[in-house]
């Protein structure tokens, strides 16, 4: 795999994809999926894809180039093994992302992810709580899972976390997000949930001994504390990455049904206001 500082124009093609015609999307698919250096001349590619050379030119211009020749010159650079000069700031930030992904890969326990997916499927209600940046990540988790049929609520307010514990039961699942493993309100909700028989999961970067007393699952996320320039990265990033892993595994269990639910929520968001289609009396 090439380093992040080897430039590719594939992301540019992808960013324009939705605005392309059917023929242009065929061309785009070829350049996005191709991994082999070959004859990329207009004549060769047009014959390969059964499109006109004029279509190649229009495609290149839609991608922001003056013509196909300039486009293909840039595209062929993808196959040249060289290091593009990058600023210290850019390499530092992207390097941290790369390292966090590597750490996440090493931390993920697939058997644990499978158990969490089972808890999500069996729970009557799911509550995910967090403060600050962890609260924002909790809100994103709520949005993702509610769109595929999970009865999930995000709680970020300290008082609501404490009040909600009164109504928890053994049919519920509580997910607490605290990178430090010391957020008082989140730990309180996990402890009280455990007492009332709810399944409890904590997402944290610190595997502290006392968490084992009231958490069914301790899910470790990558820590940025000892990474150079780690303060340049949003602390939500490791949590969101793990959320994607859980989400992907959960959807995979019944992909067709969950895709239908997701599409239905998208359609509902696009519906017109109530009464908009009705004639005035």
Image (cartoon, helix red, strand yellow):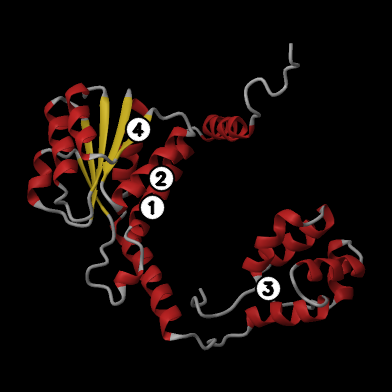
Q: Nearer the viewer, mark 1 or mark 2?
A: 2
Element marked by disc 1: helix
Mark 2 closeness class: few <14, some 14–19, many ≥20 residues within 10 Å: some
Identify the residue under disc 4: 153
Element marked by disc 2: helix
Which label is found at residue 140? 2
For the residues bearing labels 1 and 4, Cβ distance under 8 angstroms? no
Mark 3 or mark 2: name the one nearer the start of the chain: 3
Mark 2 or mark 4: name the one nearer the start of the chain: 2
* Residue 135 in view: yes
Mark 3 or mark 1: name the one nearer the start of the chain: 3
Q: Nearer the viewer, mark 3 or mark 4?
A: 4
* Residue at image point 86% right, 73% down: 44
Q: Nearer the viewer, mark 1 or mark 4?
A: 4
**Residue sitting nearer the eye, 200 or 105:** 200
- 189 displayed left or right of 247: left
* Residue 123 in view: no
Q: Nearer the viewer, mark 3 or mark 1?
A: 1
Element marked by disc 3: loop
Identify the residue under disc 3: 36
Identify the residue under disc 1: 240
* Looking at the image, residue 223 lies above or below residue 172: below
Q: Nearer the viewer, mark 3 or mark 2?
A: 2
* Residue at image point 7% right, 47% down: 210
Element marked by disc 4: strand
């Amino acid at each position: 795999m090439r380093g992040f500082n080897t430039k590719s124009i594939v992301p540019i093609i992808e960013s324009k994809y939705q605005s392309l015609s059917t023929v242009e999307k065929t061309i785009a698919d070829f350049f996005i999926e191709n991994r082999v250096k070959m004859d990329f001349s207009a004549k060769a590619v047009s014959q390969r894809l059964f499109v006109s050379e004029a279509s190649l030119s229009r495609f290149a211009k839609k991608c922001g180039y003056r013509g196909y020749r300039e486009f293909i010159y840039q595209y062929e650079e993808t196959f040249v093994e060289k290091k593009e000069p990058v600023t210290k700031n850019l390499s530092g930030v992207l390097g941290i992302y790369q390292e966090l992904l590597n750490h996440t890969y090493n931390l993920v326990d697939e058997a644990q992810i499978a158990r969490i997916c089972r808890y999500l499927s069996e729970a009557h209600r799911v509550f995910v709580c967090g403060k600050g940046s962890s609260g924002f990540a909790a809100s994103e988790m709520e949005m993702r899972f509610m769109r595929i049929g999970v009865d999930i609520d995000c709680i970020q307010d300290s008082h609501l976390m404490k009040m909600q514990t009164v109504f928890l039961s053994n049919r519920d699942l509580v997910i607490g997000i605290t990178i430090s493993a010391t957020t008082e309100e989140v730990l309180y909700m996990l402890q009280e949930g455990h007492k009332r028989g709810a399944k409890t999961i904590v997402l944290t970067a610190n595997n502290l001994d006392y968490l084992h007393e009231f958490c069914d699952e301790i899910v470790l996320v990558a820590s940025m504390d000892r990474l150079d320039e780690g303060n340049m990265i949003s602390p939500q990033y490791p949590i969101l990455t793990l959320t994607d892993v859980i989400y992907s595994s959960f959807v995979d269990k019944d992909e067709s049904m969950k895709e239908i639910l997701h599409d239905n929520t998208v359609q509902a968001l696009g519906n017109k206001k109530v009464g908009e289609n009705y004639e005035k009396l």
